[in-house]
Each structure stands twice: as structure tokens, then as C-alpha cells.
């Protein structure tokens, strides 16, 4: 696995960016920016440290799938770390096997830093080589969408 980084600057207070990104007050804000990864993207679970959380969507054949993860850390308005522990395939959680080994334990880290009313979101992702092109194309689009959503919301 290798670590890749993406950044965006959003003209909004850090609390607004954090809440919108995680969908804490309205889950549809999370679903909107992550729709770049999957149009039906959502989550089930909690953002609390140590909690299991499922990042799910519907596949091309109508099956429910996604990632099984754990919140490794959550410091509100500062940092969120998500640890991959498995996949959800056809509604079943799979946490071991060859398909999982190449990226299980990998982290997705989100850092938030506000300066003069502009919040910089930095994303660091541990990535398996076969997802390189996908993430390098999709993460910038998703962060651009997050920026648009946050900046166009009513304060």
C-alpha cells in the first residue's frame, strides 16, 4: 500500500465543513459529496471513536456492498481516522481472505484546519496499487463537490 494525499480549501468555518462532510446534522450532505464514488453512497453506524461503520452503496446488479470500517479516531473539527477492516459483499461482512489482505488495516485520515474563515481539508489514504487511478480521479471530484455543497449552504 502507498499513501496518497488530497487537499481542498473551503470558504467556511471548520465546524460547518466537519459537520457537512460527515453528515452529522443531515446525512444527505455526506451522501451528496460521496456520490462521486457511488451514486447510492451512504453509511450505517457511528462516527464515534472505536465504533464500527459501514460505507455502503448499491452495485450495478442491485446488490448492497461496500466497506466495513472502524473509526480509529475522531477529534471533532480537527481529525477523523477510518480503519478498513473488511468489505460488505451481497450484504455479508467479509473481514478475512485474500481479497481483504491487500488493504485491511489501511487508513483514511481527514484533517481539518481553519485559518481566517477558510478550512483546509487534507485527506490521506492508504491505497492498494490497483485503486490508484480510481482514487486519483475520484477524490478530487468528491472534494470539489464537498466544497460546492458547503460554500452554497445557508450559514
Image (spheres, helix red, strand yellow):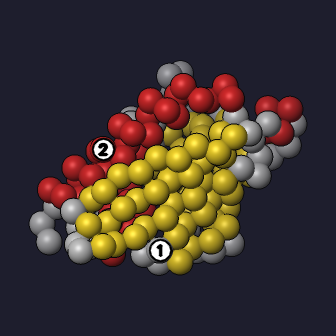
In terms of depth relative to the viewer, which is nearer, 24 or 120? 120
Depicted 141 relative to depicted 126: above or below: above
The answer to whether residue 148 is above or below residue 39 is: below
Location of the C terminus (image quadrant) = bottom left
Looking at the rendered image, the quarter that the N terminus falls into is top right
Relative image position of residue 23 (x, y in whole percent)? 38, 62
Residue 103: x %, y % from top left: 75, 41
Q: Label 1: few (<14), some or many (≥20) within 10 Å?
A: some
- The residue closer to the viewer here, 6 or 107, is 6
**Residue tagged by mark 2?**
144
Q: Residue at x 31, y 51 (%)?
A: 146
Q: Residue furthest top?
A: 61
Q: Which residue is mark 1?
A: 78
Report x, y in % for residue 25: 33, 70
Q: Please give left or right for residue 51 compared with residue 112 in the image.
A: right
Residue 43 percent location from the top left of the image? 50, 54
Per the image, label 2 sits on a secondary structure element best described as helix
**Cα–Cα span, label 1 and label 2:** 20 Å
Can residue 69 be seen in the rendering of this structure? Answer: no
Classify residue 115 by image quadrant. bottom left
Amino acid at each position: 500500500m502507498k499513501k496518497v494525499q488530497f487537499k481542498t480549501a473551503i470558504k467556511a468555518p471548520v465546524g460547518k465543513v466537519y459537520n457537512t462532510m460527515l453528515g452529522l446534522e443531515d446525512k444527505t450532505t455526506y451522501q451528496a459529496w460521496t456520490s462521486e464514488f457511488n451514486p447510492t453512497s451512504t453509511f450505517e453506524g457511528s462516527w464515534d471513536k472505536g465504533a464500527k461503520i459501514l460505507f455502503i452503496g448499491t452495485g450495478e446488479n442491485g446488490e448492497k456492498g461496500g466497506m466495513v470500517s472502524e473509526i480509529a479516531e475522531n477529534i471533532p473539527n480537527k481529525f477523523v481516522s477510518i480503519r478498513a477492516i473488511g468489505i460488505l459483499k451481497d450484504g455479508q461482512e467479509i473481514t478475512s481472505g485474500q481479497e481483504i489482505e491487500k488493504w485491511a488495516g489501511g487508513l483514511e485520515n481527514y484533517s481539518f484546519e481553519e485559518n481566517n474563515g477558510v478550512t483546509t481539508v487534507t485527506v490521506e489514504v492508504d491505497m492498494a496499487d490497483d485503486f490508484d487511478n480510481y482514487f486519483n480521479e475520484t477524490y478530487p471530484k468528491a472534494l470539489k463537490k464537498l466544497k460546492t455543497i458547503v460554500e452554497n449552504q445557508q450559514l
